[in-house]
Image (cartoon, rainbow, N blue to C red):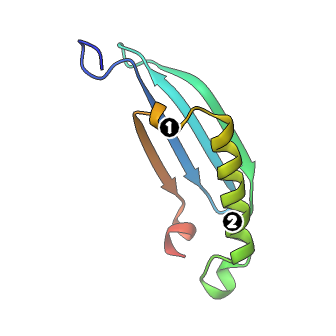
Amino acid sequence: MTENGNYPRTVAFLDFGTNSIRLLVVRLEENHAPVTLHNFKETVRLGEGEFAVQRLQPHAMRRAVDVAKNHASTTAPPSAHEQAEPAADSPIQAA
């Protein structure tokens, strides 16, 4: 932490969507300007088959977990991110 409070700081945004996973890591500067450190999107089809039974399918969840694990190993360790903001679209939240 710096004398000016919480800046600069690193924030990671993780978005699990019906079709893809997105990860955005930014550094927020003292003037609150974001500097993109990493921007990642991969299609995982997490919602595949979900609408028929109102549940996420095991094979779709495995794909999403594999992508998330693989990506986590290629970016900074979680302790380097001072704040994480997860998000999911409404079909994923409902499942």
Left or right of 14? Residue 46 is: right
Left or right of 10? Residue 59 is: right
Q: Amino acid at mark 1?
A: Ala
Nearest the viewer among 90 and 81 is 81
Instruction: Give neighbour class at mark 2: few <14, some 14-19, many 20+ (Cα, 10 Å).
Output: many
Image coordinates for residue 79, horizontal then vertical, percent:
45, 36
Q: Pointer 1 and pointer 2: residues touching (CB < 8 Å)?
A: no
Q: Quarter of the image holding residue 46?
A: bottom right
Above-or-below relation of 81 to 48 = above
Q: What numbered label is drawn on residue 12? A: 1
Instruction: Give neighbour class at mark 1: few <14, some 14-19, many 20+ (Cα, 10 Å).
Output: many
Nearest the viewer among 33 and 28 is 28
Q: SS for tag 1?
A: strand
Image coordinates for residue 13, horizontal then vertical, percent:
51, 41
Identity of the residue drawn at 66% across and 41% down: 73
Q: What numbered label is drawn on residue 39? A: none
Above-or-below relation of 18 to 34 = below
Q: Quadrant of the C terminus?
A: bottom right
Identity of the residue drawn at 52% across and 66% down: 90
Q: SS for tag 2?
A: loop
Q: Amino acid at mark 2?
A: Leu
Above-or-below relation of 41 to 30 = below
Above-or-below relation of 3 to 90 = above
Image coordinates for residue 82, horizontal then vertical, percent:
40, 33
Left or right of 64? Residue 33 is: left
Image coordinates for residue 38, horizontal then vertical, percent:
63, 29
Instruction: Give the residue number, with chain letter if any, for mark 2.
Output: 46
Question: How many angstroms separate mark 1 from mark 2 (CA)?
Answer: 21 Å
Identity of the residue drawn at 74% across and 48% down: 42
Q: Is tag 1's residue or tag 2's residue first in the polypeptide sequence?
A: 1
Identity of the residue drawn at 64% across and 87% down: 53
